Amino acid sequence: MDAKAAAEMVLGNLQSGVHQKEQDNSSAPENVVVLKSDQEGACQMCDSDPAGGNQELTESILDDLPCSQLLYFEKMDELFSASRTSPVSKGRDERVNSSSDKIRDPLTFSAGAEHRNRPPDSSSHSKCVSFKTESLKDHLKSAMTGNARAQTLQVSKTKQLKEAVLSEEIFVARKVIESSSVDIGPFYGLPSKVKDLFRQLRGIETLYEWQHDCLTLESLQQRRNLIYSLPTGGGKTLVAEIIILQELLCRQKDVLMILPYVAIVQEKVRGLSSFGIELGFLVEEYAGSKGRFPPVKRRVKKSLYIATIEKGHALVNSLIETERIYDLGLVVVDELHMLGEGSRGAILEITLAKILYTSKKTQIIGMSATLNNVGDLQKFLQAEYYTSDFRPVELKEYIKVRDTIYAVDSKTENGFAFSRLLNFKYSSNLEKADPDHIIALVTEVIPKYSCLIFCPTKKNCENVASMVCKYLKKEFRAHREKEKQDLIKNLKSIGNGSVCPVLKQTIPFGIAYHHSGLTNDERKSIEEAYSSGVLCLLACTATLAAGVNLPARRVILRAPYVGSDFLKKNQYKQMIGRAGRAGIDSAGESILIVQEKDKHLVQDLVHSPLENCYSNLLLELSKGMQSLLLSLVGLKIAVTHEEVDNFMCCTLLGVQQQLLSKEKSLSEIIKDGLENLIEKGLLKGRISQEDHNSKSTLTITPLGKATYKGSIDLAYCNLLYRELKKGLEGLVLESNLHLLYLSTPYDMTSTCSPDWMIYLRQFNQLSAAEQKVADIVGVPESFITKKASGQAIRKNVDNAVVNRLYLTFVLYALLKETNIWSVSEKFNMSRGYVQNLLSSAASFASCLLHFCEELEEFWVYKALLTELTKQLTYCVKTELIPLMEVAGVLEARAKQLYNAGYKTLAHLANANPETLVRMIEHLSRRQAKQIISSAKMLLSEKAEALQEEVEELLKVPTDIPGTH
């Protein structure tokens, strides 16, 4: 018997006991109400006369109780009734009954249930409706207030004690029932419809054995936290998705899924929108500048928030602040090992620590690469651990030294066993052009199968792609020739007539490069062409291994380096993990090209254990420890030194403190951090020098609150405040140049090297008012002129400001021309860098808006920044914006859709996939279905938000004067 069934039995016995007592003293036995279980285990109330007899019975029982108990029972009865007849339950029943499973929801009452205990009247109905919207906490508060005010009748202490025990037992039983997960079907507690959807949308017929074992783990049934790790391609994500659906449909709680990159968030939103449409939940994107804070509170549908690490943190902050963190039933983190990677790792650690500390009922599931010190992560997350070495496709690892291939074999003395010699005749010219024999390695695989070559640098990717196609036979051009020509046409249209000369040369051979120098549209087109087999070889950087899923028959590592740094074991594993495509290849192979000088280093790399994962809170001070301390006080999670100390024990740093903070104790580090925040004017209060247990309370200043709410890096918050303040004295609004300067991200100035002739040319094209902006921010015309002519500069000018204004000129040109290609040529920058600048500026403008919303003196910026954020996010003509709001629809696709007559979100949501495929070039049926599902989801989300607003406006207040 499970906890829920036991609780129902206890509740039935207890209430039957109360009713039986009344029955003994009553002459009307026909009025008895009992709880019973039907054959399906569902709770049902049987009423013989709901409008009359039951009311008399209930009132007579309650008359026999003290006033405090009377109020308690009234509230609990109403709560229980409301929970059983809520729109959520009804919605769920409708969805489940419409599926192939004819399974009754155990929490559904029979038709007359809502009428029991009292006759229906309009006032009680309005009270009930408003009551449903309150939380359990509010009910308990209300009951306690009533208890305090009520006059207690003179009754014996024994009777009082019995009644107290009885009410407590009923309360506990009901709580167990309410918190239990409800199985609503045979597919891991989900309806068969879910299984059908996985088959239709993903082609998944059955689960792997490990997936079944993992989903049926006792720890998952008991809702304990879980970390599970498998090799890349083992099917980790499917398990997470099933657990997410269980939470949304069975437990009716919201879910947060944290993914590492914007592109992966958008891919997942597209992939899960179809499930949301079919199963009745919302999928909301939190990436870049997208996402509402706090999220809209839904009364009926539950939400799946899919977020990047930074947006996930901001979302959790907003839920804690609005006391809605308990609505979050589950948090799923992909790439959990990123906890050990710089400032993003620090933000992820802060997010998880806050959830652990503030909501004991929120379950955390982490997916990770295999780690050496997973025990530390288990302690931090209070989690169970599941691991398996399962791979659906066998992976064979090799290294190549000169023309010899060795198999990686730990049983041999040096860790490598001879496999074969390369069988490819090289001319002397070819040997010079290709000393690493890359052509020999790729022609064994392409064009029939796919291949990835990981290169150390972006330039190296382009060189390798060019070199390979120069020496390939002409037959390679004939393979899927028309589709390759279509791809070049598509890239030309994306670039407004321009196409990269390297891609123009390599694509006819089925080859392309893939790195951050591509625009988002170009990258997407190349990924789609590779996935469909039009391209068979990609020369790429390490970022592809951590990004979207593009597997290959063979993976070649051009050198054991990323940039100039020697490869880490985790990076190596991630790259070779792309080898072997489930359901397509019988095996996957990886070949690491090694120079003699690196042979011993590679030996260590291949056979060493994986790296440890360490907390970054101390290494990333402004984005780590200090940011955490500020938000702890701001959210009132911890407001004294002692409380902060207690919180820090719940972090990964707390678990690893003896290892990571040898010079100072953690308490001393906290004290220094708090003092630093007080000095910066972000916190107010006093830190006791002698005793860290001092109860002196810390409070957050308005600037501190704006900083953590805007997710502003603490290194720049005071500078940002001064610049915004200065802007109030003379903001130039003739154009948006001045506002763009304020929205240009600080952290990109260090990577910028201005071309002074271009700088001067752009400056001279500005109007007089716009040139005044340069003077206001601190870059005089004379400085730019002297720099351009190579003269010595005597006047001291801040380089960061100079670089920032140069980047502002790039953004200004982008907003005017909306063409990344022409702007990148004008400023002699890579188009990928320009795209990245635009995305960063959109995110920073969004942060800036939240910062200004918290400071009344900056009220004027709110309206201005709202519009600017939108312009930076989409950077297209206004008519394309509604289409680009759909996850994964970028500018090129939006133009195609608009020109085909799909001009609004409603057009897209109601489109026919077959018609879309016919009218839009280079669009597969699967992509068409995903676009339509994403549009439907977005439309549904917007409609829901408007309905919620209407309901909120029409809701009858509970505190109308004179009604109590």
Image: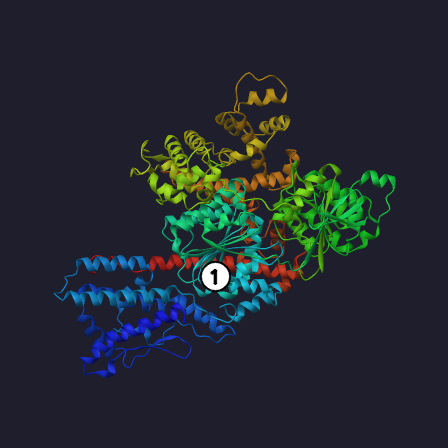
Which quadrant is the N terminus positioned in?
A: bottom left
Question: Whole-percent x and y of residue 920?
Answer: 65, 57
Residue at the spot 57% in from the left edge and 46% down from the top edge: 877
Question: Whole-percent x and y of residue 788?
Answer: 62, 22
Q: Which residue bears the numbered disc 1?
A: 220
Q: Nearer the viewer, residue 500 or 18?
A: 18
Q: Residue furthest front?
A: 413
Give the vertical position of 114 relative to 238 (above or below).
below
Q: Residue furthest left?
A: 154
Residue at the spot 39% in from the left edge and 79% down from the top edge: 38
Question: Whole-percent x and y of residue 853?
Answer: 40, 41
Residue 461 at least partly seen:
yes
Give the structural element (helix, strand or loop) at label 1.
Answer: helix
**Which quadrant of the view contains residue 119?**
bottom left
Count of number-bearing discs:
1
Q: Is residue 720 left or right of residue 591?
A: left
Which quadrant is the C terminus positioned in?
A: bottom left
Question: Whole-percent x and y of residue 740?
Answer: 51, 36
**Which quadrant of the view contains residue 711?**
top left
Query: What amino acid is found at the position of numbered circle 1 in the picture?
Result: Leu
Q: Is residue 299 left or right of residue 743?
A: left
Residue at the spot 13% in from the left edge and 65% down from the top edge: 153
Q: Is residue 340 left or right of residue 79?
A: right
Give the vertical position of 164 relative to 798 (above or below).
below
- Determine crowd level at label 1: few under 14, some 14-19, many 20+ residues with C-alpha closer than 10 A: some
